[in-house]
Amino acid sequence: VQLQASGGGLVSAGESLRLSCAASGRTNSWNTMAWFRQAPGKDREFVAARFYNGDTVYADSVKDRFAIFKDNVNNRLYLQMNNLRPEDTAVYYCAADRTFYSSNYKPSNIRDYDFWGQGTLVTVSS
């Protein structure tokens, strides 16, 4: 069971990036997948999650700018990030869990996920 995040880099404010998370192992049991991020000196925070039924939920700070989606054929989770801001600068992590979370619950706690990938650094210059 492994998650591998990639796609980070240095961009200017207003530009876009797409992060990718490659999943291996028993991926058919990963019913909830998410992206978190951690800025220097700050706690890891929730960015977006995709439920088993395809529903999605976002942090208020990225709503309408970021989109989480999954390619089931290639077992990849993506985070499309548009109109990036300097405050989006962070190491981004993908996470997965077998739990069938209800869409009425926002799985935004790091304890909601058992599997984590290594991070990919996103730097947004002003």
Image (tube, rainbow, N blue to C red):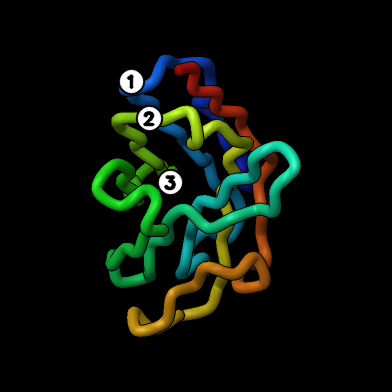
Between 57 and 54, the one lying in front of the other is 57
Q: Position of residue 47 (x, y in %)?
A: 47, 53
Residue 15's disc is 1
First in sequence: mark 2 or mark 3? 3
Q: Give the residue drawn at x 30%, y 71%.
A: 53
Q: Quadrant of residue 50?
A: bottom left
Q: CA distance from mark 2 to mark 3?
A: 19 Å
Is residue 12 toward the left or the right of residue 8 in the image?
left
Contact flag, marks 1 and 2 (Cβ < 8 Å) = yes
> Crowding at label 1, few (<14), some or many (≥20) Cα neighbours within 10 Å?
some
Q: Is residue 97 above or below residue 77?
A: below
Contact flag, marks 1 and 3 (Cβ < 8 Å) = no
Q: Position of residue 69 (x, y in %)?
A: 32, 49
What type is the residue that disc 1 sits on? Glu
Q: Give the residue drawn at x 61%, y 32%.
A: 120
Q: Which dot, 1 or 3, sits closer to the camera?
A: 1
Is residue 89 toward the left or the right of residue 110 in the image?
left
Is residue 72 toward the left or the right of residue 111 in the image?
left
